[in-house]
Image (spheres, helix red, strand yellow):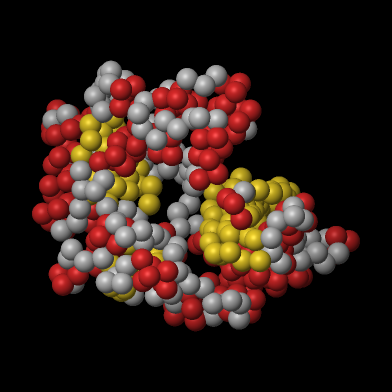
Amino acid sequence: MTKDDASILHADLDSFYASVEQLLDPRLAGLPVAVGTGVVLAASYEAKAYGVRSGMPARRARELCPRLRFVGGNFREYQRLGDAVMGVLGDFTPRVERVSIDEAFLDVSGARHLFGDGARIAGEIRRRVREELGLPISVGVATTKHLAKIASQVAKPDGLVVVEPGSERGFLDPLPVGLLWGVGPATRARLEERGIRTIGELARVSPAVLRGLVGRATGSRLGALAANDDGRAVAPGRRVASVGAQSALGRCPVGEAPVRETIAFLADRVASRLRAKGRAGRTVTVRVRFGGMRSVTRSVTVPSGVATTLTLTELAVGLACGALADHPGEREVTLLGVSVSNLVPEAPVQLELPLAGDDPRQAGTPSGLARRAVDRALDEVRARFGRDAVGHGSVVFGPRRGVPDAFRALAERDGP
């Protein structure tokens, strides 16, 4: 593929979970639908028109849309249909990079002689997904990954947008800066304070000024994307480089107890996924988002890989509490995240010499071996009877979660 070819596609199913519910129950077609119980996990376009959004408390969603229909969620159907869509994409090219359960990038440069150009292939994908699976899907076609993703966002709902080579600036410049990868509410607000509201305005900001506004790394990345400088290739079967999970807390008052409980819950999810992949990680990172969308991260790198739930919990709790101590003026925590990177194969345990003491964070000590044995037993029971069958006390008896584990399992994805 060359830059003269619009051969990168981004395919994104529209309001996927709600669309599946409307497919399974035709009586819901055209009605405002929300998936969830106490909190909105997903909303149909009809519900979004009233301001209903993911993560919104059900009570608030009903205030905005009295006709809103709540459904519990058919998680097996989400997985089945998501996999079926990926099967359709794979019929056109083996170069499919699945980003999540409902979206993927494709490189169709090698399939043009069989199926036509990128626009024709995108149209055929949309036809087949609609006719064979009954689902709406939006597709963006462009010369780069980030441009194809923006095009698919512009195409929603249920549309197709092709950015022809040579027309990139005319397409990008008038679009809001929030469409760029990595521009969240806090970054967008910071840019808008300086009068930077469109991608074209961002592209005209000098690199030095941009780095001063949003930091060196973020500034360099956003400047490159605004200039359509994205050399990343579609990477089918990409190697996982990080495993993480996060939880939105609403407006939780700052305090060590709720932070510890949530971190324990997240560490349990991350550690079990690491073990399932036969991996461990040396770098643990915690993200804390305060009120007003202000976020901080803390990380630590340890000598050997971590995949034990209690060890990961201890490391992550220490990082999170350190972040709280460094920001004594903050009153609310709205989100917590735990991720593990710098991954290595989970190595066989080597027993520590008695002189090393009994540090439970060392896998080869008596306490470390006991932690590993507990995790293995939990993994075996969960594999047979389900994740809710058993767990660590700090997680099982912790605060009730508004998001079902089945939904979390679908939504969580590991980083490239």
Q: Is residue 122 above or below residue 117?
A: below
Q: Residue at x 59, y 34 (%)?
A: 214
Q: Is residue 117 above or below residue 329?
A: above
Res 265 quadrant in image: bottom right
User: Picture coordinates of residue 41 (x, y %)?
Assistant: 39, 65
Outermost right residue: 355
**377, 160: nearer the viewer:** 160
User: Picture coordinates of residue 209 (x, y %)?
Assistant: 60, 23
Answer with left or right where residue 117 lies relative to residue 202: left
Q: Residue at x 80, y 64 (%)?
A: 359
Is residue 404 something that shows in the picture?
no
Is residue 248 something that shows in the picture?
yes
User: Picture coordinates of residue 5 (x, y %)?
Assistant: 25, 23
Q: Residue at x 54, y 64 (%)?
A: 250
Res 133 quadrant in image: bottom left
Q: Quadrant of the N terminus?
A: top left
**34, 385: nearer the viewer:** 34
Res 228 quadrant in image: top left
Answer with left or right where residue 229 lies relative to residue 137: right
Please state the total of marks drawn on the protein image: 0
Q: Residue at x 60, y 27 (%)?
A: 211
User: Picture coordinates of residue 48 (x, y %)?
Assistant: 32, 58
